[in-house]
């Protein structure tokens, strides 16, 4: 190992884990996106797959609004954790989760009420079949946004492997659900499998973070 690389590893002990897990997380994201498209296209008709792609595009409105917040959360959490400010660390997670979660739920409820009209206005009445698929797909993003702080918190705490574990379990759960749900429900089932992905991901994340959350509250009390 070269001296500069060894020096970096000594100064930043977790840098290698951070790099390789980030790479693998990106690989899993591509696998999830492209692999699911291939499976859904193979199991459904071209018309149904077209509606599914429309639902995907419409659902991206929610996460697009949260991207700037996600990018700014990690540096703040990393600073708080390294400074041993546990109480403030978990307070930021709680407040951010509440704000983003409430906003996501309100956005989803707005689509529940006006989604059919918006799709008909933007795309025409022939695409009304995309409403239910979009509604369920957006629900998956609501769950994801309620856990917007989970991954940056894991990275800030030096647990990229556990973050990778959560994403891996979510991806496995997704593909296990995808085949039977698409076979039974078509593209609605494909959206439901995506909800399953984020439920599995969020559960693993919360299980990993819970001991630190409880310990942090104990120290505060």
Image (cartoon, rainbow, N blue to C red):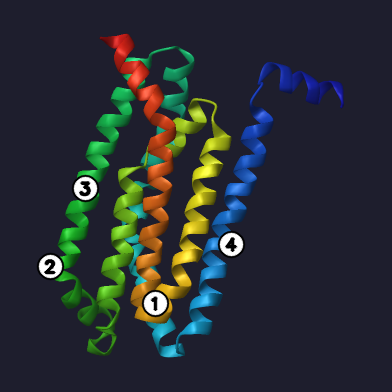
Mark closer to the chain start, 2 or 3: 3
**Dot 2 surroundings within 10 Å: few (below 14), some, or many (20 or more)?**
few
User: Dot 2: what SS?
Assistant: helix
Mark in the foreground, 3 or 1? 1
Q: Is residue 53 visible?
A: no
Mark closer to the chain start, 4 or 2: 4
Q: Which residue is mark 3?
A: 103
Quarter of the figure that contains the C terminus: top left
- Identify which residue is drawn at 35% across, 17% down: 216
Q: Which residue is mark 2?
A: 113
The image position of residue 147, as x and y in percent, is 35, 42
- The image's mark for residue 31 is 4
The image position of residue 140, as x and y in percent, is 33, 58
Asked whether disc 4 touches disc 2, contact meaning CB atoms under 8 Å apart, the reply is no
Q: Is residue 180 visible?
A: yes
User: Dot 3: what SS?
Assistant: helix
Relative to 194, residue 22 above or below:
above
Mark closer to the chain start, 3 or 1: 1
Q: CA distance from mark 3 to mark 1?
A: 25 Å
Mark closer to the chain start, 4 or 1: 4
**Dot 1 surroundings within 10 Å: few (below 14), some, or many (20 or more)?**
many
Q: Which residue is mark 1?
A: 52
């Amino acid at each position: 190992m070269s001296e500069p690389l060894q020096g970096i590893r000594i100064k930043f002990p977790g840098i290698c884990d951070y790099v390789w897990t980030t790479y693998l997380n990106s690989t899993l994201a591509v696998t999830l996106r492209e692999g699911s498209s291939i499976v859904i296209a193979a199991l459904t008709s071209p018309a149904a797959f077209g509606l599914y792609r429309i639902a995907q595009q419409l659902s991206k409105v929610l996460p697009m609004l949260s991207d700037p917040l996600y990018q700014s959360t990690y540096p703040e959490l990393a600073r708080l954790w390294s400074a041993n400010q546990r109480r403030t660390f978990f307070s930021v997670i709680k407040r951010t989760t509440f704000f983003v979660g409430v906003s996501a739920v309100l956005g989803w409820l707005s689509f529940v009420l006006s989604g059919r009209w918006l799709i008909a206005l933007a795309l025409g009445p022939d695409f009304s079949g995309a409403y239910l698929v979009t509604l369920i797909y957006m629900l998956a993003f609501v769950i994801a946004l309620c856990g917007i702080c989970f991954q940056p918190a894991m990275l800030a705490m030096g647990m990229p492997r556990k973050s990778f574990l959560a994403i891996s379990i979510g991806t496995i759960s997704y593909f296990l659900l995808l085949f039977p749900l698409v076979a039974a429900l078509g593209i609605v089932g494909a959206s439901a499998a995506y909800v399953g992905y984020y439920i599995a991901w969020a559960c693993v994340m919360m299980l990993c973070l819970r001991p630190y959350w409880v310990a942090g509250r104990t120290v505060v009390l």
